Image (spheres, rainbow, N blue to C red):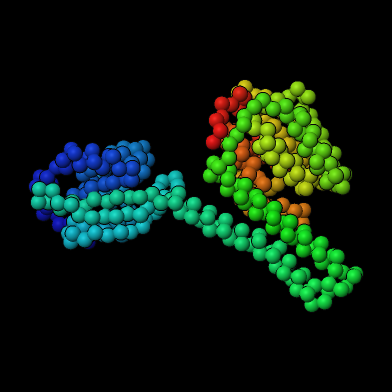
Amino acid sequence: MTVRSFISKDSIPAIPPFLQSFIDADRDAVIIVDPTMRIVAANRSAASSFTRDGSSLANRRLTEVFREPALHKAFLGAIKENAPSDLRVEFGFLTKSKYDVHVAAISLDGATFAVGSFQDITEIERLERARQEFLSNISHELRTPLTSILAFVETLEDGAIDDRENNRRFLNTIRRNSERMHALIADILELSSIETGDISLDIKQVRIFNVVEEIFASLSSKADGRGIALINEIAPEGRVTADLMRLEQMLTNLIDNAIKFNREGGTVTVSLESRGDKDLVFVKDTGEGLPSSHLSRIFERFYRVDRGRTREVGGTGLGLAIVKHLAKLHGGEVSVRSTLGQGTEFVIELPVNANVQPI
């Protein structure tokens, strides 16, 4: 459909200044199209969303800006038939964005214009996908140990409880899977508290050498069982600005992972380096390393490079996500670098003398 060419631009009234001020106050992108299908007004959000350089959209034809036939039809329907419409479109330059669009007619001095409001739902949809994936992962992670528990309980009920050779083994399996479920639920609650800001930080100067030594002591039996040497390269006087309990939580997660996914007879090394306004804490192992394709997703909830190996060595799949969020709460961040066949190194960056208030 096209607008007939006999419509004279001179016969179309101008958009009153107050209307421009009104749409500029809207955080959604808004454009107004005249009967000739030219854009006569657009707010700043529309200019930044629909042009490469944030330039003005005024006096441009709708077809110059959008190549969406459904969108053209919606604006034309509003102008010619006074018919409002709702639709969903996707467009963008470097990255695609999704919009819920509402188009309706307005009358100005006897002429009919169409107003389109574009609500960017890209982030909303991403969060919804993340929520669905999270629920799916929780269901899967809980189903596996629960299925095992129920199977062994039924076996015991069917008479295996009197089998002296196997009943203890069955009970140990039930206990191990129960502990796995308990750990998973605890990590889910912990991550939820961190993400919602329902925790406070007690920021102090922490003697990190002592923290690492205590973690090594608690994990020494696990390391000794695989012949892994734990090396603390931090000077005894080394300090960082952090919440003691949360720092210990971050390092315990990283060191425990470094032991689990290391080679037999390997090493786990923790070191500290100061660079200007931040302290860097390194946790390095001599394991098999991670493929580069996984590094960008390693801190996602439930993301696993090798699901079978992770379940074999234990873990909930939430430890690195917890580390990431705790580092951000400190005003810092965590990163990873890895080389296949040589090992993996995690780095926690903490601001020096950070003025982080309790949440």
In the depicted view, which residue is nearer to us: 92 or 168? 168
In the depicted view, which residue is nearer to us: 293 or 258? 258
In the depicted view, which residue is nearer to us: 220 or 18? 220
Q: Residue furthest bottom?
A: 158
Q: How many marks?
A: 0
Q: Quadrant of the N terminus?
A: bottom left
Q: Residue furthest right?
A: 165
Vertical position of residue 136 compared to residue 21: above or below: below
Q: Position of residue 286 (x, y in %)?
A: 79, 41
In the depicted view, which residue is nearer to us: 241 or 3? 241
Residue found at x 73% / y 29% = 208
Residue found at x 62% / y 22% = 276
Residue found at x 77% / y 60% = 175
Residue found at x 19% / y 39% = 18
Q: Quadrant of residue 251?
A: top right
Q: Position of residue 329 (x, y in %)?
A: 58, 36
The answer to whether residue 218 of the structure is visible from this angle is yes
Q: Quadrant of the C terminus?
A: top right
